[in-house]
Amino acid sequence: MKLKSLLVVALAAAVPALACAKKPTKVSAETPVKEAPAAVEEDPVITEECVMNVSLFHEAVKNKMYADAYEPWIEVYKTCPNANKSIYSDGMKIVEALYRATSDENEKERLAKLAVEMQDKRIRFFGNDPKYPTAYILGEKGLAYLDFYGDDKLEEARECLRASAEGMGSASKIMVLVKLVDASYAVYKKDANDKAEQFIADYELASNLLGEQAGNANNKNAEVAGKQKDYVDNIFAISGAADCSKLDEIYANAVKDNVNNLDMLTKIAKLYKRVRCTESDVYFAACEAAHKLQPTDESAAGCASMAAKKGDYEQAVAYYDQAIKLAMVEDELEDVADYQYNAAFYCYNNLKKYAEARKYALASIATLSGMGMNKGQGRCYIIIGMCYASTQLYPQDAKGRILNKTVYWAAVDKFVKAKQIDPSVEAQASEFISSYSKYYPTKEERFDLPNEFSGNTYYVGGWIGETTTIR
């Protein structure tokens, strides 16, 4: 076997594991530290007996004969831990089975220590494995802490799981990401004041990585990742850390200190958007600063919310126009539909620009329809209906007052369409149908205008320009 320097071996085992290792004792700056001469350490020799024992315990594990596998396994683990990666994959199965089978507390403690120690040794000898590198093994170490020690080693588990997630990125093991949030949440509950920022950061990392996995069409575990993302999102939602005032305490200074740090500003803005704290001044500040550095659809949408809060709805719609264009470039069509709807709402509700509101609402409907999504279209049809119902097309003379009632036919058409295509708005649409159908032109009024109401249909003119049924 080749010789390796002790320094190289130590670095391979320790550097990636710093996040879940005890901090070294500090050395006084006044104390001179002499470098020891480089030592060399020989890898254990892989003997014929080692090879035979590997075969013995591996076969026993395949047959779930864990007690029989233990003796040849522990012999290999002690004498030639560099012989084969199966020492560690099979070893965890053996240790877990023996741990579950015994009621002896001393034996349980020994096996728990062995399970964690095993990961450190695996890092030393197989930390450079391309498929299961040190970062992956740190995840296994974090899981071992949780499995064998439970709440007694939460901090150690969290640090290892975090290091694994950072190192593996979107290739992280799903369970590592889920348990990172679980462990961090448990730590946060014990000390909410000091651990809130840590918990939020861990949640963001895990949720984002699970989102990447769920959105990868080539990932066979995409569906599982999506479900687990929903789980960690729910944990965060009920944690209390998602409280907007709590986020403001944590991130107000962070925004001020990072006005030129686009990455940090974007992360903060995304977090606020995810937990629906988009009315916060901190969120506005992050979006505005990010928008100045590099406009994105999210920063533009944040600026739109800020403008609306200040009562500048024209500016809000202008920002949504930017958000729509930027989101289209990124093919983020669900966001495009949301921005189009928001622009429609402000045009209808605040600016009273009904034709503009319809334009945005129809654009949102088209976007959702293109994705095969019915949900979301209903609210757009309701906006259009409300625009029609709010319109006065004719003068307020005797004839005009009757003709102005025809807009309610057109409005109800949209409310009916809303609940037909999108059951989520059925109750609201039905309420509007009941309310506005009371204002249809009466039979007597239609009788007074025989030329206008001569058939079964009526053309509602002006900017509406639609044919509706007389009823």
Image (cartoon, rainbow, N blue to C red):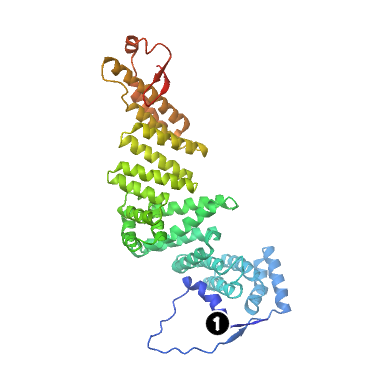
**Which of the 4 image quadrants contains residue 406?**
top left
Q: Which residue is at a point 51% across and 75% down the rendered structure image?
A: 15
Q: Circle 1 sits on which residue?
A: 7
Q: In the drawing, does residue 246 fall left or right of residue 207?
A: left
> Picture coordinates of residue 99 (x, y %)?
57, 67
Residue type at the position of mark 1: Leu
In the image, 66 versus 398, the foreground residue is 398
> Picture coordinates of residue 263 (x, y %)?
42, 60
**Which of the 4 image quadrants contains residue 398?**
top left
**Residue 302 seen in render:** yes
Q: Is residue 302 above or below residue 136?
A: above
> Picture coordinates of residue 208 (x, y %)?
47, 56
| The C terminus lies in quadrant | top left
Q: Is residue 328 above or below residue 67?
A: above
In the image, 106 versus 291, the foreground residue is 291
> Picture coordinates of residue 174 (x, y %)?
54, 58
In the image, 61 versus 259, the foreground residue is 259
Q: Is residue 270 above or below residue 333?
A: below
Q: In the drawing, does residue 142 fall left or right of residue 267?
A: right
Q: Which residue is at a point 44% across and 28% down the rendered structure image?
A: 417
| The N terminus lies in quadrant | bottom right
